Image (cartoon, grey):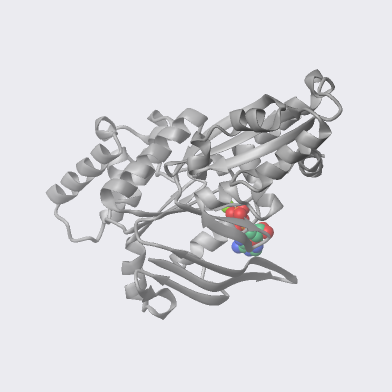
Amino acid sequence: MIELKDIDVIFSNDDKVVTAVKDVNITVDRGEIFGIVGYSGAGKSTLVRTINLLQPPTQGTVTVNGQEMQKLSKKELRGARKKIGMIFQHFNLMDSRTIFDNVAFPLKGSGLSKDEVAHKVAELLDLVGLEEKTDNYPSQLSGGQKQRVAIARALANDPDVLLCDEATSALDPKTTSSILDLLRKLNEQLGLTIVIITHEMSVVKDLCHRVAVMEDGHVLEQGSIVDMFTNPQKSLTKEFINTATHFDQEIGLVLTHPMIQNIDENGEIIRLSYVGDETTKPILSNLVREFDVNVNILYGHVEILQNTPIGNMLIAVEGTSENVDKVIEHLENSDVSTQRFNDLVKEYVKREG
Ligand SMILES: Nc1ncnc2c1ncn2[C@@H]1O[C@H](COP(=O)(O)OP(=O)(O)O)[C@@H](O)[C@H]1O
Ligand SMILES: [Mg+2]
């Protein structure tokens, strides 16, 4: 559906040269929700603007819907852009126009009659749950409602693709999740392909099928949301994930809690991460039975991503040092991935200082 191939974007102003995007290769399938996560300045907005050539790449090719965008004539490009909707952090509505006029705006020049436009706008406002607000002005709407208007407007020309640039970053958590629910509904009902860029992993984790992590213009890694959450390769990815799952916060709490001091000297604290079927297996009771150790749960959390349960647990294992070693060996040979507390703390301290 969307293919970004070997994309570079280089800005040269006066004597300053900024490489905003470097060597990026991303393909997004039809009907997919694809997330791009990175901190401010990573190059996300620049990259996403290459999809509709609002930002022509310095290097590389952009293909959308089988059309190589850079080869289109001006007129063809205008047509192609109509099939790529876009929404932004600050909604970009026209404040002096009614909600109706805002949504009808992209239909100018579409050849639709006045009645047909009215019908289309009513349909779009119904889709985003704002049919009552047609005669209101943007200033009379909440942030979430404004974003719904922006979504209705972006869908006016029945696009195949919706690009979302930090679309929920100005919204509170509850409104954010209602907008994400709406995007999911549009994806499922209309088959809309969605690219969503954000600095928050929590935004993509329940919504996206695949995700790419960006830093300094590069894509560090990309993959399915389940793979990224269970087997992240780069420390930046781990950082985003630990923030989204609150794992860092929990480690911080566990680290400073007196119970750590009370674990006996042969005891080991271990992080267990497990996916899918492993979450339903009696891992802990097996350890206790087989290795004659005590197991204490310090922290536990299960998350369901793309219908796949993902578990994270911090346990203290106490027993003879021989048995504790056997437990760790046993876990390391199972499908549960393990990390010893000391390694965990090292990573944590590196991230949190
Ligand atoms: N028009 C521009 N001219 C010069 N530099 C730019 C321009 N647009 C973006 N940049 C620079 O490119 C880099 C990436 O910016 P951007 O794509 O906005 O990142 P993000 O959306 O991830 O915050 C930043 O260093 C930014 O300052
Ligand atoms: Mg940006």
Number of marks in picture: 0
Q: Tell me residue 199's x, y (percent).
A: 59, 46
When the figure is inspected, residue 285 is found, relative to residue 276, above or below; the finding is above
Q: Quadrant of residue 139?
A: top left
Camera-nearest residue between 83 and 302: 302
Residue positioned 53% across, 76% down in the render? 60
Residue 168 shows up from this direction: no
Residue positioned 67% across, 43% down in the render? 330
Residue positioned 29% across, 34% down in the render? 129
Q: Tell me residue 308's x, y (percent).
A: 46, 42
In the picture, measured across the screen, residue 168 lies left or right of residue 121, that is: right
In the picture, measured across the screen, residue 285 lies left or right of residue 131, that is: right
When the figure is inspected, residue 9 is found, relative to residue 259, above or below; the finding is below
Q: Quadrant of the C terminus?
A: top right
In the picture, measured across the screen, residue 278 lies left or right of residue 157, that is: right
Image quadrant of ligand 1 equals bottom right
Q: Quadrant of the N terminus?
A: bottom left
When the figure is inspected, residue 157 is found, relative to residue 246, above or below; the finding is below
Residue positioned 27% across, 50% down in the render? 190
In the image as oriented, which residue stretches furthest toward the right? 265
Camera-nearest residue between 273 and 127: 273
